[in-house]
Image: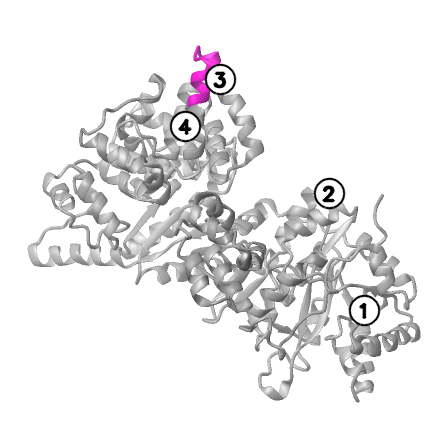
Amino acid sequence: MATEFVHLHNHSEYSMLDGACRIEDMVKWAVENSAPAVALTDHGNMFGAWELYDKATKAGINPIVGCEVYVAPGDRKKRGKEQGGPYHLTLLAEDATGYQNLLKLVSLGYTEGFYSKPRIDMEILREHHHGIIALTGCIQGQVPQLLCSSRQEEGIQNFKTLMDIMGERNLYVEVQNHYIDKELEAYPIMVELAKEFRLPLVGTNDCHYLRKSDHGMHDVLLCIQMKKTVNEQQRMRFDNHFYFKSVDEMREALKDYPPEAISNTLEIANRCNLELEYGESVMPKYEVPEGHTNDSYLKELCYQGLREKYGELSEAIRKRLDYELDIISKTRYSGYFLIVWDYVQYAHKQGYPLSARGSAASSLVLYALDVITFNPMDYDCLFERFLNLERISPPDIDIDFADRAREHVIDYLVQKYGADSVGKVATFATLGAKAAIKDVGRALETPLEDVVRLTELIPSTPGITLDEVLDQVPDFQKLADRPEYRELMDLSKSVEGIKRHVSCHASAIVVSNGPLTNYVPLFKDKHDQVASQFEGKTVEGVGIVKFDSLGLRSLTETYDCLQMIKANHGKDIKLEDIPFDDEKTYSLISEGLIAGLFQLEGSSGMYRVVMQLKPDNFEEFSAIPALYRPGPIESGMMQQFIDRKNGLQKVEYLHPTLENALENTYGVCIYQEQVMQIARDMAGFTLGEADILRSAMGKKDEALLKAQREKFIQGATEKGISAEEAEEVYDLLEPFGGYAFNKTHTVA
């Protein structure tokens, strides 16, 4: 049976270091408490809007996307202390129109109204109010604030302005009770105003954390935000009333208000029906020549490009090209490939050095389009690792430019598609294992030497969690189990992974069909860069085209060298024409002369590996970045590879079917593509199915891994391999799959 109350005023971790609710947990709470809906109203932003929409919809919960906006006392464009602090106003999207207007309001708050906070004003609310339900706000709202002061007439006037903008149907008088004196003074007057102007009441709780027991964790987050300690008296603190209360607790809190304050939460929840479906409309349009479709023009360009490279095409190349084009057509990404080809062609014509990397370098189509500089077929690079029908996800084409050229390429995109259609992408810094202990320790006033002792025992493995450290490092566990560290460890684990800061991603660029604010909210960072409030994966979920491009100094310097050689010696050298079998080059590398080599320089550990391995061919050379990482080092895989290369250990295969995939790496499985090849050779997987297995191993998806294990063993037995042998191979692959490297990336 559905609950009789819906929480409409909630702050997630995206209200940085103020909200402590993870969206996934909010949705889970709604499911467990039979709530038909849950709202998200973070401070001044919509960073979590799509995440709520996606996760709540999948869980059968109605997502109410909103924002507790900051409202400038006057004109949003005016700056200065005389302006005074902004007020709060709760806005909820009733439908897709309201969502679009909310995107624009929140974006304008950053791009036009930012002054300490992203601020809107009544002018743009009037322009973008359609489809939005407004609640008059918490005690920091303009109406309750003015009613509690000597400016009551001004408060009533503001109330009338809100009514004039929103209309009687879309404005609710918000009442709360966190047992704060100011609330008890202001809200009874608000009730009288509601009666006088015949407006409905709605009761909310200003939820900043999920459970009552999370109060301590939230208090520590506030201390981290304000650089205070829990014992300081003169600091902001919350009494323990700002959590997701039960229906009975809300009835008790609002018992002095009319019952409609409770029932109207359901009315609003029922009115909010947000359905978002963008599809291909988000993709910027590439204008193909008359008589062509995206598919036909891409095919023509590819065949033309390969004929220029090879003359007559072999059957193998034709077959691979047609296969890739078919997948690209079926996934409807031909337009995307044309957009990439277009701006890469621009860069080539301008003489800008560039280099592609990542799984995209497994595409013969991209080789034909001159986006990558090598034929992926020469290096067993599997296209299915990049794009396949069994695991459809947006193609991710990473292209690096010489550092001084990158902005010129972005300018080209701006000129072609419009300034309001091109932007950067948000990236969120979180409290990792070490940072959580350091920050919580500071807030609890834990002696610095104790914090250092704990953090020094945490491995530098990217993304490692405190639970994993407790499992893997006995000395850390022994120390963490001491009674004096119990509170520090409990609070550190509770805040671990919480988002603490947002900035612009170093390489990601998004381009949309029309203004970005039709699809995503925008924000401005401290450097005045405009970016989507959604991070990369979320942007892809919306369907917006994302390009990753870094500006690399090494590319600039390499091409400057080529220009100097041409000027001084009259030799016109192209990088892609330099042979990969030059003995003198490998001799220099084997002597440890790796300064300036992209991804190999800058580490004494890397230097030792190169000296021990002494690579004398490209397969060995390209394996180094895949081997020199925490997983292969800690598992002994890297040393095994080195020993086998140097004849100190015999090359062996756990099963004969593994030789095809592992013969070039001395029987050691180091690449994701090798996992895929083994699944194909041993268990009869298609390469698309094998990519699902590879992805499940990487994400440690337990439910999917269980199903994949059964499928692997069944497939192997159908090929005459015993279940015991198949299990042994699978048990070898599964943990490795979590840290396997993308071969295409290291080759590129």
Q: For the residue marked with disc 4, what is the amino acid?
A: Leu
Q: Helix or strand or loop: what does disc 3 sit on?
A: helix
Q: Given the image, on which type of amino acid does mark 1 rest?
A: Asn
Colour scheme in use: one colour
Q: CA distance from mark 4 to mark 1?
A: 57 Å
Foreground residue among 14 and 641:
641
Against 647, is 72 above or below?
below
Is label 4 in a helix, a strand or a loop? helix
Q: Which residue is mark 3?
A: 715
Q: Is residue 405 left or right of residue 692?
A: left
The secondary structure that most of the magenta stretch takes on is: helix
**Above/below status of 675 relative to 621:** above
Q: Is residue 720 magenta?
A: yes
Image x and y of residue 692, in percent: 50, 32
Nearest to N terminus: mark 2 or mark 1: 2
Q: Quadrant of residue 455?
A: bottom left
Secondary element under disc 2, as helix, strand or loop, is: loop
Q: Which mark is residue 177?
A: 1
Q: CA distance from mark 3 to mark 1?
A: 61 Å
Residue under the point 64% across and 62% down? 216
Residue 732 circle label? 4
Cα distance in 3D space between marks 2 and 1: 30 Å
Residue that extends furthest to the left in the rendered view of this protein: 569
